[in-house]
Image (tube, grey):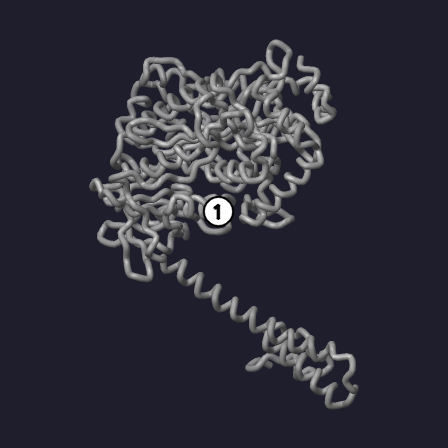
Amino acid sequence: MDLNLLSNPIFRDYFNFHQSYGELIGENGNIKPDWETFFQSYAQLGDEEMSNRNNDTLRLLKENGVTYNIYGDPNGMNRPWKLDNIPFLISKEEWNLIESGISQRAQLLNLILEDIYGERNLIKKGILPMELIYNHAGFLRPCNGIKQPGKHRLILYAADIAKSTEGKLWVVNDRTQAPSGSGYALENRTTMTRVIPELFEGLKVRHLSPYFNALRNGLNEIAPQKNLNPRIVILTPGSKNETYFEHSYLSSYLGFTLVQGNDLIVKDNFVWLKTMGGLERVDVILRRVDDIYCDPLELKSDSQLGIPGLLQSVRSGNVSIANPLGSSILENPGLMPFLLQISKYFLSEDLILPTIASWWCGQTRELQYVLDNIQTLVIKKIYRNPTGSSSIDGASLTASQLQACKEQIKANPATYVGQEKVEISLSPSLIEGRIVPQKVLFRSFLVSNQDEYIAMAGGLVRSSANTVNFNISSQTGGFSKDAWIISPEPGRVVNVLKENPEGAAETYNDMLPSHAAENLFWVGRYTERVLGNARFLRTVMQFLAEGNKLKTENNRQTERNLLEAFTRYSFTLPGLLVKRQKKYLQIPGKK
């Protein structure tokens, strides 16, 4: 063990946990080489300087407006983004395993998606139970048989990966509907290179820009009718969505227009963007809206986020969507127990990255196992609850809650899954000036490009100090981390997007959506009103602050008149009006 470094006071709070050796210490008992290089740079900065840099990080994230919106948060909806200045290091050998494993998994899920909305051979041959598909809210019958250009139906994919204390890698969740987090990963990397560039010294960290170049190219490839210059838009639910910052950030970074449902219209089976210059045809939609909300005409009729007729436009081959509507069926945790058999059926090979052990309750033996071992399992529904968590930690339930949970499972077993709780390894984190071990969950991203899947050489890491709760979620707080893929390949840590190569599509930056123009108009109006109020208030304050004027009746009357005028001018009734004069409290036109 490297006593010179590990005896450093910076680790005084770290080794109080026996599980904390997982990420930092190798099998030989020494600190891992990459971590040793990192903490040598850390030690040179010192605790005081790192504290100052941490404040700079928080300030920069706040200035950039980086937030993660929390519904129903008593502290306000817009929660500031938290970034841990100690990254999550992944060695080249470990990354090679992860990259090959998630690429294989994306290929497999793409084949499953094509089969579910196509021939459905998996169901016909008994490999996949029909109840698992038809009971899932993400199975959209109107999407049956719909195809779009490109080799892959599944364009974007993200996998949540956990490492056990024994060093095994497990896929915990699949994200296939509208995977989020890539924009936050890019912002984390950009912030760290600006605030603490010294920590990168001696470590060849792979950059993230190739993924975003592949994303742009992949979206160009699925444009209908081989359009060489497609218009691509990012469809967002709006500013109240929890990841709205990412939507606007990627829109700016990639050069795609950010739109909401009311910015688009379907006419003659084509999707059109309403701009100040008229209607502009849309070729590709990168959606951040849940699929059932995308078309109120054929899917969820009360949705105000989608575009009526969108599905018919897709069916006609006039617009492509990434990911396609209906892809949320793949986020079904009930698929996990069957993935190995499906992999052998489609690919004739085993899974490179195993899935976490799962038991679908729609089978008699598996149901009994879940009921008998419920306190040691995590119980999930096969579809996510849009208003809250769909996971229940059996160990956290009281006796009455445990019995109620069993009754719910037995009432509708086909909609429940039991999953093993893996003891997740701990990684160093800088929290409140101390280096402490925390559980981490790594999310990796892939995009279809030129008949293969390209992985982001990095990703988004979420950490949790709660060593008891198995679930790690941004909704429950915690910190984010930057993921560093350590590779001997040369190259800059961060690249801006390169200029479009020859023959690549250009982005549209000259047309302003009518909805955005309307918002800018009202921003201007309210800005004028604020400036007018400020000037008027300054005049009133100057008059009140004059200490050498005579307290004459004329001055008192002028003061009352100014206060009354400012209240009415600023529409802050009753404001500064004299309450005993009831006529001041009356709004014109009302009694």
Q: Is residue 368 left or right of residue 318?
A: right
The x and y percentages for residue 335 are 42, 24
On-image quarter of the N terminus: top right
Measured as percent of width and height from the top left, residue 363 is found at: 45, 19
Q: Which residue shows up at 24% across the image and 45% down it?
A: 318
Quarter occupied by the C terminus: bottom right
The answer to which of 514 and 270 lies nearer the viewer is 514
Rendered location of residue 465, percent (x, y): 65, 30
Q: Quadrant of residue 53?
A: top right
In the image, 177 versus 4, the foreground residue is: 4
Rendering coords of residue 263 (x, y %): 36, 55
Pick the residue in front: 40 or 59: 40
Rendered position, 63 above or below 99: below
Q: Up-down: is 215 above or below 437?
A: below
Q: How many marks?
A: 1
Q: Amino acid at mark 1?
A: Tyr
Q: Closest to the observer: 237 or 360?
A: 237
Residue at x 21%, y 40% (from the top left corner):
226
Query: Is 57 situated above or below 398?
Result: below
